[in-house]
Image: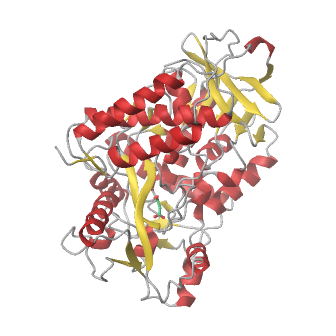
């Protein structure tokens, strides 16, 4: 694979210097920035506007032990069970033990968590949790409210520059150490030099045809880190959210019907109106996500339906408007009053359990290159993420990353190695190739997989990658296509190698 996508004269590019560069402005990026020493000059780069991140869309909430009825040991147990035995226990211990402290920190930052009538944090339940432990904001607008609060604080910090519409092209390295990034903004390409680069670019949903992730989730950070020599792991573990609103369209982004709806009593029904989770798992409709997803996929095949339903008509309109304002209004836009009608849903790509391999301080194998949030693989999710553990991971490991940088400032290196390659002028049809990859991933790297399909998919994606490896990337869309192809290749390669059936990686031939 080629090392860089930028292929111009780097010496002529404008240079800027920072102590820390954070690529990504979701909760992982912002929380990492806010935990940095205020003496460190930090740039937080947002690919689009701040409100376009996956974090912004997060509905359900943040899982943490915040009530007397709950224990870190229970949260640990639920995480390990959901992860199908493949979680890193040390990482999970850090997550569940340190998480409540980060919730306290968010409260001190005035994140507007919903409260119970007694004035305590209101907590709810989602799939795989044996206790109520999900804190939330604005009913079902946890991500939006948290990002808004963190971004507002970051904008008042004189050491933090929040830069929107900055696109990551490449990560620079010097003698196996991070040295900065090449980015493109409205003025063209520039080099941002820094000894500490944090990748917090979120998910990879756009690799699939249907996803809850925003349009920008093309895995740019993971792909750039791979090109720079970072190690990935667990890439085969893709979480499909069981309940996205059934409204297939061209954009690929599907609206989420939060698992918290089932946490508040919603039940799944097939198109004949039958409840089908009984007998599938002792936790029925609130079983871990991979189990519910497969049960829905089976039910869709059995009934020849394109969707199933979530039925929350047991709750009043008054309750639902208050508890799920975003979901209530979105469904209403489509002519569905969820207090009276069932919601049509289907499973779509939602989350990547794997990513760039990091240790307990979010460090990668490249000195000075850190990864936080969904782009990282801390090992806490194993083969299947427990609901609402992801925002907690963003915070716990974002703070740890910042603490590590605070203690270990690296000297900036300006002698990064950059090499141009001979490229071909090409007229590849980007839209068509993107569609082809998404189709391959749904058919061959989707909910149910088999060895033959995975190997075929890998070969097809490999062919596309070979073509892209030697072309001149003239547009941001063409770089995104390359990134999507790199990620698709990594997922399929890992899925071929894991010849067993575990968590979200379901091999029909194993
Ligand atoms: C949801 O609200 O169902 C999604 C929460 C998550 O992905 O953890």
Colour logic: secondary structure
Q: Is residue 315 visible?
A: yes
To which quarter of the image does residue 6 belong?
Answer: top right
Q: Point out residue 152 in the picture as x, y percentages from the top left corner.
A: 76, 54
Q: Point out residue 384 in the picture as x, y percentages from the top left corner.
A: 34, 51
Residue at x 56%, y 26% (from the top left corner): 369
To which quarter of the image does residue 117 belong?
Answer: bottom right
Q: Nearer the viewer, residue 406 or 363?
A: 363
Residue 217 placement, left or right of 299:
right
Residue 296 placement, left or right of 201:
left
Residue at x 73%, y 35% (from the top left corner): 43
Q: Nearer the viewer, residue 423 or 318?
A: 423
Residue at x 67%, y 35% (from the top left corner): 476
Question: Which quadrant holds the C terminus?
Answer: top left
Q: Does residue 487 sit above or below 426 in this rendering?
A: below
Q: Does residue 174 sit above or below 287 in this rendering?
A: above
């Amino acid at each position: 694979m080629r090392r860089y996508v930028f292929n111009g004269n780097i010496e002529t590019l404008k240079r800027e210097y920072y102590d820390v560069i954070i690529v990504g402005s979701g909760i992982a990026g912002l929380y990492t920035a806010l935990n940095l020493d205020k003496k460190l000059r930090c740039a937080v780069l947002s690919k689009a506007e701040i409100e376009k991140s996956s974090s912004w869309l997060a509905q359900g909430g943040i899982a943490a032990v915040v009530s007397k009825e709950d224990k870190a040991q229970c949260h640990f147990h639920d995480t390990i069970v959901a992860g199908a035995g493949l979680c890193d226990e040390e990482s999970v211990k850090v997550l569940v033990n340190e998480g409540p402290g980060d919730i306290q920190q968010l409260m001190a930052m005035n994140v507007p968590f919903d409260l119970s009538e007694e004035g305590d944090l209101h907590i709810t339940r989602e799939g795989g949790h044996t206790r109520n432990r999900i804190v939330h904001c604005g009913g079902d607008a946890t991500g939006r409210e948290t990002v808004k609060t963190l971004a507002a604080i970051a904008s008042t910090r004189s050491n933090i520059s929040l830069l929107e519409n900055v696109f990551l092209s490449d990560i620079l390295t010097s003698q196996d150490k991070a040295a900065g990034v090449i980015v493109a903004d409205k003025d063209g390409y520039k080099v941002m030099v820094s000894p500490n680069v944090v990748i917090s670019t979120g998910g990879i949903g756009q690799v699939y045809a249907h996803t809850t992730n925003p349009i920008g989730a093309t895995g740019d950070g993971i792909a750039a880190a791979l090109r720079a020599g970072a190690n990935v792991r667990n890439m085969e573990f893709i979480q499909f959210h069981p309940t996205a609103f059934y409204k297939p369209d061209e954009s690929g982004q599907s609206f989420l019907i939060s698992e918290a709806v089932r946490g508040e009593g919603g039940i799944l029904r097939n198109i004949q109106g039958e409840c089908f989770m009984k007998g599938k798992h002792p936790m029925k409709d609130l079983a871990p996500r991979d189990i519910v997803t497969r049960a829905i996929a089976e039910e869709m095949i059995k009934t020849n339906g394109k969707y199933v339903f979530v039925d929350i008509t047991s709750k009043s309109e008054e309750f639902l408007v208050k508890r799920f304002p975003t979901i209530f209004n979105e469904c209403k836009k489509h002519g569905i009053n969820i207090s009276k009608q069932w919601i049509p849903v289907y499973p779509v790509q939602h989350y990547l359990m794997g990513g760039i391999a990091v240790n307990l301080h979010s460090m990668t194998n490249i000195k000075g290159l850190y990864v936080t949030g969904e782009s990282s693989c801390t090992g806490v999710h194993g083969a299947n993420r427990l609901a609402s553990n992801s925002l907690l991971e963003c915070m716990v490991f974002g703070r740890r990353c910042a603490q590590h940088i605070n203690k270990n400032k690296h000297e900036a290196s300006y002698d990064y190695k950059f090499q141009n390659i001979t490229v071909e002028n090409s007229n590849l049809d980007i839209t068509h190739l993107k569609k082809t990859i998404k189709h391959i991933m749904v058919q061959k790297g989707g909910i149910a997989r088999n060895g033959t399909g995975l190997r075929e998919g890998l070969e097809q994606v490999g062919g596309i990658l070979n073509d892209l490896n030697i072309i001149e990337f003239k547009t941001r869309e063409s770089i995104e296509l390359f990134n999507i192809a790199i990620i698709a290749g990594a997922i399929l390669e890992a899925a071929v190698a894991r010849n067993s059936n575990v968590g979200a990686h379901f091999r029909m031939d194993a």
